[in-house]
Amino acid sequence: MVRLTPTLFVGNNSLQLERIGIAGEVASSVGAGRLAAIVPRAIGSWAMLGLLLRGALGRLGEADQIDSFDFTSLSVRVPRMRRLKLATDGEVHVVAPPLRFAVSPQPLMLVLPREEDRVPVE
């Protein structure tokens, strides 16, 4: 599948996706070894602002200008660009395309606090 878009969001947090209005199969597959992509169609600045407002109100998935899908691997090519900005967890990096997003075959290893130091989850 090929998409032309001014921006791309790739995520792995089903709760965040549901909060902006991307629910259903895409959001539920994120916790099951898949990533999610949100792809706005090529639109103008005012329409993009409207999409931002929809996201803030939790209604982004209702917009006709949005495609969302889940995947295990995604390649992003940007013709005629040698560098582009990539934001990861709030940090902006300048990278060279093509970009490749993929689910890691190995689980993330976490260090947990000792049992007595943990805060109970309600």
Image (tube, helix red, strand yellow):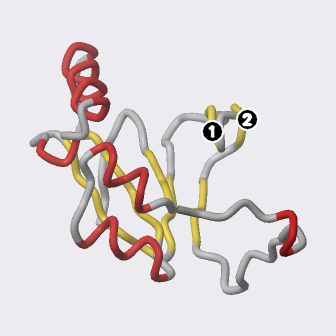
**Disc number placed over residue 86 in the picture, else none:** 1
Instruction: Name the element at disc 2.
Output: strand
**Disc number placed over residue 45 in the picture, else none:** none
For disc 2, the marked residue is: 93
Q: Quadrant of residue 102?
A: bottom right
Say which quadrant the N terminus sits in: bottom left
Left or right of 100? Residue 49 is left
Q: Residues within 10 Å of mark 2 (few under 14, many from 20)?
A: few
Instruction: Name the element at disc 1.
Output: strand
Left or right of 55? Residue 36 is right
Q: Residue 52, image x and y in percent?
A: 30, 26
Q: Is residue 7 above or below residue 38?
A: above
Q: Is residue 16 above or below residue 57?
A: below
Question: In the image as oriented, which residue stretches furthest toward the top?
Answer: 46
Q: Residue 32, image x and y in percent?
A: 46, 82
What residue lies at 48% left-to-right and 53% top-to-bottom?
10
The answer to whether marks 2 and 1 mark residues whose Cβ atoms lie closer than 8 Å is yes
